[in-house]
Amino acid sequence: TVVKASEGYENDTVGLGYYTIDGSETSAETYEESLRESILQKLRDGKAAPEAFADLTEDAAALHVSKLEHIYLDGKEMLYDENDSEYAYYGLITDEYKYAYYDYDADSYMMFMDCGLVADYTGSPVLVNAEYVHALGGTYEIMTMPQEERSLDLRSGWVIGDHTWEVTGHYESGTYQNLKVTRDGTDLQITAYEGENYKVISVTAADFCKLFDLTYTVDEEEKAIYFTSQQAAADL
């Protein structure tokens, strides 16, 4: 099933692929609804021409933009480009995660974070948390080194101002169990979602704020999420 969109848009087709409707458990109506949802999201994201789907534009307006491509911290865009980590061989790969995405099940924009996994067998490690800690003038540390085993009890943490955070969890076979984040010894009750791969997990924007004492706002039209530290808020 392929639906043509107008010229000048990022994708000139909107579709799910090709399917044979042969009386299987998946009905034509199911495919049609999935196709409709795909078109609605592409309309909301500006990747399909409104004039091509005039009867769907109102429903599309009720959706959230699927990806916020810009992340700001205290007015400065986070480019995820720190390359001075002692654990990275070819520079960090955090630039793969410099966006927030919307999760309808969680009813929130989601951010990526890491658990301090820097074992050699993972290649260049992701250290999202460290980039925010450093940007906020704090210090970051991985307390469980070396990481030679394939089954690891991980522990990392950071200090910003007078407050101390700690992340603990068990890593094995590409998954994390018993993830816990504390601030000054108090469990922050962070809910972990699967990330794009085993190197990161996803958390709601609200939970991400707990990691660094931040607040946030979203501008979907600008495709941006803005984080503000307590110090910056006090200076306003």
Image: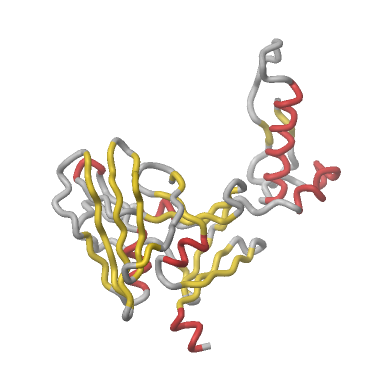
Look at the picture and state if 105 lies above or below 134: above
In which quadrant of the rendered view does residue 88 lie? bottom left
Is 18 on the left or on the right of 6, as rendered?
A: left
Look at the picture and state if 190 lies above or below 213: above
Q: Identify the residue shown where x is 47% and y is 82%.
A: 232
- x and y percentages locating residue 152 in the rendered image: 22, 45
Q: Nearer the viewer, residue 207 or 39?
A: 207
Look at the picture and state if 71 lies above or below 151: below
Is 164 on the left or on the right of 100, as rendered?
A: left
| Quadrant where the image shows the N terminus | top right
- x and y percentages locating residue 66 in the rendered image: 61, 50
- x and y percentages locating residue 188 in the rendered image: 41, 63
Q: Identify the residue shown where x is 53% and y is 88%.
A: 236
Is 41 on the left or on the right of 225, as rendered?
A: right
Q: Nearer the viewer, residue 224 or 156?
A: 156
Look at the picture and state if 92 lies above or below 230: above
Q: Identify the residue shown where x is 38% and y is 49%.
A: 200
- x and y percentages locating residue 178 in the rendered image: 34, 48
Q: Identify the residue shown where x is 47% and y is 72%.
A: 214
In which quadrant of the rendered view does residue 12 lie? top right
Q: Nearer the viewer, residue 82 or 10?
A: 82
Looking at this view, name the residue that lies furthest to the top. 22
Judging from the image, the colouring scheme is: secondary structure
